[in-house]
Image (cartoon, rainbow, N blue to C red):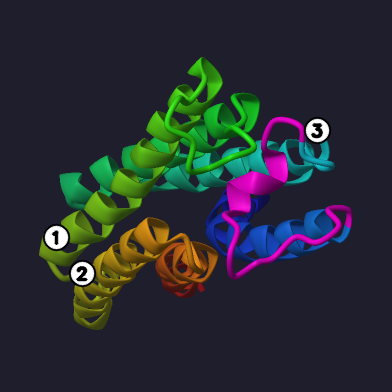
Amino acid sequence: MVFKLIAIYSGLIATIWIFIGVTVASRFYAGYDHSKQFCSELGASGSPTEKLSPIINNYPLGFLFCFFGWYLVQLSNVSILVGISGWLVIIHGIGTWVAGYFPMDADPFTKNPTFNFRVHSWAGFCMLLSLVIAPVLIAISPTSEIIPLYFRLLSIVSVIATIYFLFAMAKAVKKQSNPGTYQRISYGIQLMWLSIFSLILLCSKI
């Protein structure tokens, strides 16, 4: 019972953890700019926090995502879409591990990315896609005690908002202006969706 309770909380814990983890890691990176730099630049090759960032961010976060995804997968008497969403959250966790193990290049705008950067980018893409598809599946899943109607509607809103800020980030990347801000907002929306899902599951158990 306690094991499953922790699993339910892990979706919420992940959101709090990444906020604290990125803040702490940035303290050891002189001149780091949250608005102009990506979160992954904390673990980029040659950065002052190349080793620190994956240890306090990617690896524990990957575990939390996988743990929450496992809880969704093992739920019984729910729509199969909820189980598929759980597998997508697990994919997000695995992608988080891979992105931490294979660092991006120091120059995020390089024309000739290294092998590590290419793997990192694909892992990031899988992470992004997994938490775009999962809310869509929840949105079209049947209304139930675990998936109330308001959360289905909120899932649709979160996907639209995520995509909007992704396009804003893409524009900022082209201008090389402040992509870090839009990345944080976009990913923050996805994590807030996960946190709310975590709380809804918790309330359904009380």
**Dot 2 crowding, Cα within 10 Å, few <14, some 14–19, many 20+:** few
From the viewer's side, name the closer residue of 69 and 193: 193
Q: Residue 51: which quarter of the image?
A: top right
Q: Where is residue 68 in the image (x, y as percent from the top left)?
A: 50, 48
Specify which label sits upstream in the sequence, 1 or 3.
Answer: 3
Q: Which residue lies furthest to the top in this view?
A: 115
Q: Which amino acid does label 3 sit on?
A: Lys
Which residue position is annotated with label 3? 51
Label pair 3/2, CB-CB below 8 angstroms: no
Q: Position of residue 142 (x, y in %)?
A: 12, 64
Which residue position is annotated with label 2? 144
Magenta segment, which residues?
A: 28-46
Disc 1 secondary structure class:
loop
Label pair 1/2, CB-CB below 8 angstroms: yes
Front position among marks 3 and 2: 3
Disc 3 secondary structure class:
loop
Q: Is the magenta stretch mostly helix, strand or loop?
A: loop
79 on left or right of 129: left
Disc 2 secondary structure class:
loop
> At 49% across and 72% down in the image, what residue appears?
199
What number of labels is visible?
3
From the viewer's side, name the closer residue of 125 and 20: 125
Can you say whether 107 is above or below 11 in the image?
A: above
Q: What residue type is labelled 2?
A: Ser
Q: What residue type is labelled 1?
A: Ser
- Which mark is drawn over residue 141? 1
Determine the CA span between mark 1 and mark 3. Answer: 41 Å
121 on left or right of 167: right
> At 51% across and 74% down in the image, what residue appears?
206
